[in-house]
Image (cartoon, grey):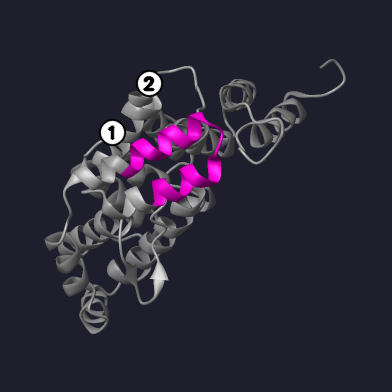
Amino acid sequence: MLFFGKRDEAQGLAKKARRYTDPSQAEFDFGQGVECLKQAVDLKPDETRYREELALAYLKAAELAVTCGARPGWRLERSAELALQEYDRAYEMSGTRGERAAKAPPVGAALFASLCLGDEKGAADRLRSWCSRRSGMEPRGENLDLTVRTIQAGVTRGKIEGEPLHSRITAEELHMFLTMAVDFLANVGAREPEEFARLAEEVGWVELVNSMEATLPGPGEARTHLERAATHGKQGSRKDAEAELETAAELAPDIAWLCRTMCELGGR
């Protein structure tokens, strides 16, 4: 593009990518969308938003492989790892002090990617670092643990205070929900740890998480619904596939199992 700068070209590529990665669009071509985002990152490597979008695209890959038959061009098992690489780079680029640090990318996608890999310690470490940067204080270990456990149990089943926890693995929705959850931890759990514990007790948070963890179903029924979702996806019935995936998510033992099984079935 001779008459436009790199910034304009990168913006144009990102705009194309949003259409290509949206299965409701006629231009849907997930692999091409990811390539557009990679090019945008190459053109403007200092723009963290393109890395964040690329990380979210990687996290959408397994779901879209199951529900739409998307073929991203890499082994689906690597998706969470690739997402973390982009997120961590964006996080490092945001700096540690001043205004840029306050704009550190939301941690939701990184937490979800860590849990996809079964790395609860990594999720807690990222959460601790992000909270420390946002509030200048580290939350207590027990509050970190409770938040990670809530994400692990709540993403795949149940409701808290009547609000659904986005059981369907939709990256943008999870990004929003997890960011709200960890904002609460950063603003209350770090600055006022006793208040955090009091509120958790008041709303029955601990009991709810314990209950969800104690009633984790076996994977058999969840796998059946995932297999149905993959079949519908290959047949072009996206809405039916998404409905089966939502049911599978509610029955899944945990996030890591769900993501691993989606990668297996979506990669066939």
- Secondary structure predominantly adopted by residues drawn in magenta: helix
| Secondary element type, mark 1 | helix
Q: Residue at x 41, y 71 (%)?
A: 163
Report the amino acid beneath label 1: Arg
> Camera-side residue: 263 or 210?
263
Image location of residue 237, percent across then percent down: 55, 39
Image location of residue 158, percent across then percent down: 31, 65
Image location of residue 264, percent across then percent down: 31, 27
Q: On the picture, is 223 further left or further right than 141?
A: right
Q: On the picture, is 210 further left or further right than 236?
A: left
Q: Is residue 70 magenta?
A: no
Q: Is residue 67 visible?
A: yes
Say if 196 sits above or below 51 in the image.
Answer: below
Q: Residue furthest left?
A: 214
Question: Which disc number belongs to residue 260?
Answer: 1
Q: Earlier in the sequence, mark 1 or mark 2?
A: 1
Question: Which disc number belongs to residue 268?
Answer: 2
For the C terminus, the image quarter is: top left
> Camera-side residue: 194 or 113?
113
Say if 29 sits above or below 117 in the image.
Answer: above
| Secondary element type, mark 2 | loop
Q: Magenta segment, which residues?
A: 225-246
Q: On the picture, is 23 further left or further right than 177?
A: right
> Camera-side residue: 121 or 268?
268
